[in-house]
Amino acid sequence: DTSAVATSYWWWNPHLGMNIAILTAVAVVADILLFIKKRKRSSKNSSGGVLCLYERASAAWLPLEVSSFFVGAVLLSYNTYTRLNATLLACVQKEDLDDVKYLVQQGAYINTKNEDGDTPLLFSAYSGNLDCLKFLVKQGADIHVKNKYGETALILSAQEGKLACVKYLIQQGANIQDKDIHGHTAFLWSALEGRVNCVKYLHQQGADINTSNNYSNTALISSAYYGHLTCVKYLVQQGADVRWKGDSDKTALEWAMANNEINQQAKDKVVEYLSNLEYAK
């Protein structure tokens, strides 16, 4: 329950550092008061009796009790902060914008990451939740952040064909030249997945038609290999180099012919189209 996570932390402050500073101040003041108290007891019990020894021992242990309280409070703060962030990631994935807004208001970190380095913004971009995407950006989410695979919000949106999110991110300054760990840009990913609308838009925004990944494969090669005829036609019409040799020294036509794992009809159409281009042979 979203509200339970936030409200159970009754003294929550969005700035964890402020909580720690307050607790530190409390601990310091308590130690000063204990020191004064011990000095008074020492002056009143000069006989060194049993009572004096008991009080000195008690006074010696009290700072440890204060320190234990301080450490426990910090751990509680960190634990609740972590739970709040984890709940934010979960709510973004469920596309529950109301809960996302509530958690951000309660102090959840807008750029929190999971074990793969995915942030709330990356999840919103992947799912194509434009309203959530806009809210997160307005709240200061980093549009240039990458997960451990090197994927940005723009790359994930293009990968899934979420054109509205692609347009918005570019308007906000997302870099179309960013690459993931395999050298795929948003343009290359959209071609690989057959997202022709994103392919067209990204090309219009300046994406190089013959850009390649770390394996020298271009958008045309990727589209041909996966049987995306509409993308293949568009790329060829826009001047994609059909003689470009990518991985294993193969052209788009040769790669299309080599893939036996896609729909045979889709493969045949791409092979037929490229074969009819005299300069592609």
Image: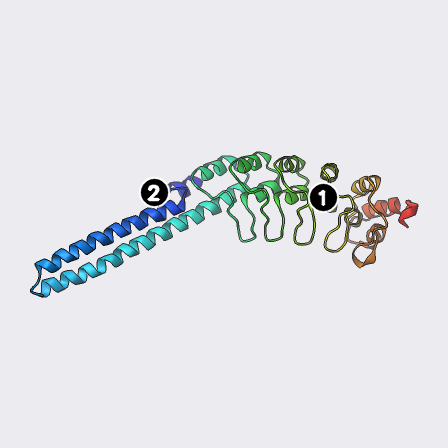
| First along the sequence among labels 2 and 1 | 2
Residue 32 image position (x, y, % from top left): 22, 53
Residue 9 image position (x, y, % from top left): 37, 44
Quadrant position of the N terminus in the picture: top left
Residues at marks 2 and 1, CA–CA distance in whole angstroms: 47 Å
Judged from this view, the residue extending furthest toward the right is: 278
Residue 163 image position (x, y, % from top left): 67, 36
Q: Nearer the viewer, mark 2 or mark 1?
A: 1
Q: Amino acid at mark 2?
A: Trp
Q: Which dot marks residue 248?
A: none
Q: Residue at x 58, y 40 (%)?
A: 124
**Between 257 and 220, which is closer to the camera in this rendering?**
220
**Between 96 and 144, which is closer to the camera in this rendering?**
144
Q: Is residue 99 left or right of residue 233?
A: left
Q: Is residue 58 left or right of residue 255?
A: left
Q: Residue at x 26, y 59 (%)?
A: 64
Mark 2: give few (<14), some (14-19) or many (20+) Cα within 10 Å.
few
Mark 1: give few (<14), some (14-19) or many (20+) Cα within 10 Å.
many
Q: Amino acid at mark 1?
A: Phe
Question: Element type at marker 1?
Answer: helix
**Between 80 and 269, which is closer to the camera in this rendering?**
80
Quadrant of residue 193 within the rendered picture: top right
Q: Residue at x 56, y 52 (%)?
A: 116
Q: How many marks?
A: 2
Residue 249 image position (x, y, % from top left): 82, 57
**Residue ID for mark 2:** 11
**Residue ID for mark 1:** 187
